[in-house]
Image (cartoon, grey):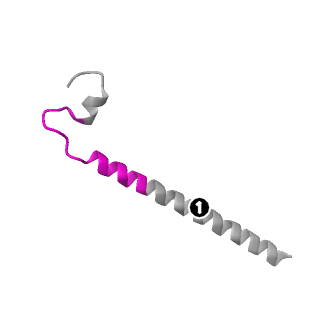
């Protein structure tokens, strides 16, 4: 009986770890994608993303 419980606990732990690794990988991919988007060259003469998001003109 103890062996069965150990196997069930190991399987649950492995499933949890796998799900956690997949979540971290997707967050890393999302961060990389947003970093690439924000590093695109901006047109000359603008205040950049910060000025575009603020109320005040640059």
Quadrant of the image occupied by residue 42? top left
Q: Secondary structure at mark 1?
A: helix
Q: Is residue 21 left or right of residue 36?
A: right
Counting from the top left corner in percent of width and height, residue 34 is at 36, 48
Q: Residue furthest right?
A: 1
Residue drawn 13% across the image and 37% down it: 44
* Label 1 Cα neighbours within 10 Å, binned few <14 / some 14-19 / many ≥20: few
Residue 44 in the image: above or below residue 1: above
Residue drawn 43% across the image and 56% down it: 28
Counting from the top left corner in percent of width and height, residue 49 is at 27, 35
Q: Is residue 32 magenta?
A: yes
Figure disc tally: 1
Residue drawn 30% across the image and 47% down it: 37
Q: Residue furthest bottom?
A: 3
Counting from the top left corner in percent of width and height, residue 46 is at 17, 32
Pick the quarter of the image with the C terminus: top left
Residue for badge 1: 19
Residue drawn 64% across the image and 69% down it: 14
Q: Is residue 5 left or right of residue 41?
A: right
Residue 53 in the image: above or below residue 30: above
Question: Which residues are drawn in magenta?
Answer: 29-48
Counting from the top left corner in percent of width and height, residue 25 is at 47, 60
Quadrant of the image occupied by residue 10? bottom right
């Amino acid at each position: 009986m103890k062996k069965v419980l150990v196997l069930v606990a190991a399987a649950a732990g492995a499933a949890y770890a796998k799900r956690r690794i997949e979540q971290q990988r997707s967050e890393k991919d999302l961060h990389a994608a947003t970093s690439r988007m924000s590093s695109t060259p901006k047109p000359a003469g603008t205040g950049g993303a910060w000025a575009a998001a603020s109320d005040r003109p640059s």
